[in-house]
Image (cartoon, rainbow, N blue to C red):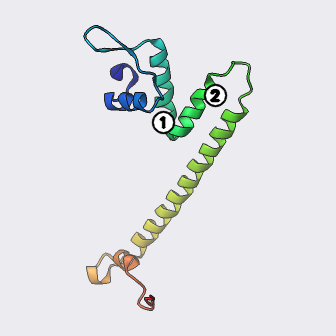
């Protein structure tokens, strides 16, 4: 199952432990026997995780996917919109980080550690006061 789905065995066991994936039956030798439903559910979980959905949200998406196919998908849309907003926020944060690092590198005279603008950016402002 791990090879087919691209999930690590320890991850599959964890999903079983927390109830995201039903425990499979076992053969006489005690080996797990997975069926098509296990495979489909595990692929669903893996793909949702690749998009960064937390496990609680994956559980919710799985529950929604079990509803009748003619049910509206507004709840799924809402979940995806919220995730997209989180991703866009992270992208904005990363762009700000990129701009700061770029500015620091541009300001750096590439001389000595004593005159390093990058290290200066990490140091406390000399006018800062410590209070109780």
Q: Is residue 27 above or below residue 114?
A: above
Image quarter (top left, top right, bottom left or bottom right) of the C terminus: bottom left
SS type, badge 1: helix
Determine the image quadrant of residue 82.
Answer: top right
Up-down relation of residue 70 to residue 113 (above or below):
above
Residue 96 is tagged as: none
Quadrant of the image occupied by residue 101: bottom left
Front one among 68 and 115: 68
Pointer 1 residue = 49
User: Image point 62% across, 24% down: which residue?
Assistant: 65
Give the percent coordinates (x, y) of residue 100. Answer: 47, 68
Give the spatial CA distance, label 1 vs label 2: 16 Å
What is the secondary structure assignment of the residue under circle 2?
helix
Viewer-side label of 1, 2: 2
Q: Which residue is mark 2?
A: 64
* Depth check, front residue: 127 or 91: 127
Q: Residue at x 52, y 33 (%)?
A: 48
Residue at 59% x, 34% y is: 60
Task: Compare residues 91 and 36 and report the one nearer the observer.
Answer: 36
Dot 1 and dot 2 residues touching (CB under 8 Å): no
Q: Locate residue 69, reporting x and y percent.
A: 69, 18
Dot 1 crowding, Cα within 10 Å, few <14, some 14–19, many 20+: some
Residue 62 higher or lower than 93, as above or below: above
Tag 2 or tag 1, which sits nearer the N-term? 1
Percent across and percent down for residue 43 are 47, 24
Q: Look at the image and tell me in which quarter the N terminus lies.
A: top left
């Amino acid at each position: 199952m791990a090879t087919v789905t691209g999930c690590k065995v320890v991850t599959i066991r964890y999903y079983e432990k927390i109830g995201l994936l039903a425990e499979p039956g076992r053969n006489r030798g005690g080996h797990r026997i997975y069926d098509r439903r296990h495979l489909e559910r595990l692929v669903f979980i893996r793909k949702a995780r690749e998009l960064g959905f937390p496990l609680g949200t994956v559980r919710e998406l799985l529950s929604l996917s079990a509803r009748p196919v003619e049910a509206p998908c507004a709840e799924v849309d809402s979940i995806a919109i919220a995730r997209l907003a989180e991703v866009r926020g992270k992208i904005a944060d990363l762009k700000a980080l990129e701009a700061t690092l770029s500015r620091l590198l541009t300001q750096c005279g590439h001389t000595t550690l004593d005159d390093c603008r990058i290290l200066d950016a990490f140091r406390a402002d000399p006018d800062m006061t410590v209070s109780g």
